[in-house]
Amino acid sequence: MSTRRALRQAEPVRHSRILAIAGERGANVVTNDDIAGPIDSSDEWIRQRTGIVTRRRADADTDVLDLAEAAARKALDAAGLTGADVDAVIVSTVTYFHQTPAAAAVLADRLGATPAAAYDISAACAGYAYGIGQADALVRAGAARHVLVVGAEKMSDFVDPTDRSISFLLGDGAGAAVVGPSDVPGIGPTVWGSDGAKASAIRQTHPWSALRDDPAAGWPTLRQDGPSVFKWAGFQMAPVAAKAMAEAGVGPEDIQVFVPHQANMRIVDQMVKQLGLPAEVVVARDIADTGNTSAASIPLATERLLAEGQASSGDLALQIGFGAGLVYAAQVVVLP
């Protein structure tokens, strides 16, 4: 007769929430006039097209991990935790130069979080929202108690100064959040997806293998089809955000803060209009002086709203990331 023991599974936790959010921006303020010449443009043209007045870019000797570490340490301090309290580290980035080991593993070591689980995700501008969705699932499944989610990008490393499609949008920075257990719901269901048929809308000019095979190919940089991206983000992402509200059991009248990926001010305005958000809803517009920081943009924008008193702890926020892939993710969260 068998005496095999019954399999034990992790005990689930009913709810999770964001315990703290922090950010780190590139040290240098880059004005429109600083970059207008090579693209044969002007401060006025860039402001009208994007709403950007300045963008933040890091020093040459500052890399993605430096930005990520600075943001992560601030978030852990705000949560009253140390690296030793972290069970999993998730880093979303598309600008880390090493294929392996993962940026998350190196970051975990820097923070004293070893032996926390650590892995990177590549979801571009949707990466932070992807990370929050995964952290929520890990905590509620009982697989981790505290999860550190970091969106970190040094987009300036992939800028062609003469490119008029996307280069003038991009900035550098990192945003970090700590997710942990909660007595009440703090993170709504994540609504996410992809549309790889539109992958060419935001793309790298050529693969790294092209540079290996022919040095004359030059350094890969980023390009986008602006009109296609505007139509996709401005009109197709609003239904995704609306579904995230519905899945969370709330409506536009319940939302106090809207934090979309800081892609372009015109896209932000279009989404607000499409969603029918009340006039009193606080809308993140960090892009005006930080620029588009891809995976870092949502936590950076959220951190700024909290720091400036435009949003408060306990506010109900709708956040949505969308970008290269094309990929997207949205959820309703309670602000820390």
Image (cartoon, rainbow, N blue to C red):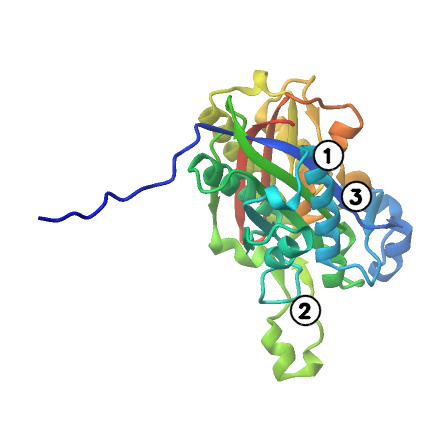
Mark 3 vs mark 2, CA separation in Å: 23 Å
Q: Are marks 3 and 1 in contact (CB under 8 Å)?
A: no
Residue marked by disc 2:
220
- Residue that lies at the very extreme toward the left in this rendered image: 1
- 99 or 238: nearer the viewer: 99
Residue highlighted by disc 1: 303
Disc ID at residue 321? none
Residue 164 seen in render: no
Residue 259 pos. (x, y %): 65, 32
Q: Which mark is first along the chain, 2 or 1? A: 2
Q: Distance between the residues labelled 1 and 2?
A: 31 Å
Residue 250 % position (x, y)? 51, 20
Percent of width and height locating residue 284: 71, 31
Judging by the rendered image, the residue that carries numbered circle 3 is 290
Who's the residue at 81% across and 50% down the image?
26
CA gap, disc 3 and disc 1? 12 Å
Residue 101 left/right relative to 30: left
Q: Label 1: how many residues lie within 10 Å, few (<14), some (14-19) or many (20+)?
A: many
The quarter of the picture where residue 22 lies is top right
Kind of element beneath mark 2? loop
Tell which circle, 3 or 1, labels the residue nearer the N-terminal end: 3
> Hey, what amino acid is under mark 1?
Glu
Question: Tag 1's secondary structure?
Answer: helix
Q: Nearer the viewer, mark 3 or mark 1?
A: 1
Q: Residue furthest right?
A: 33
Dot 2 amino acid type: Pro
Q: Nearer the viewer, mark 1 or mark 2?
A: 1
User: N-terminal of the two: label 3 or label 2?
Assistant: 2
Name the image quarter holding the C terminus. Answer: top right
Q: Position of residue 151 (x, y in %)?
A: 65, 47
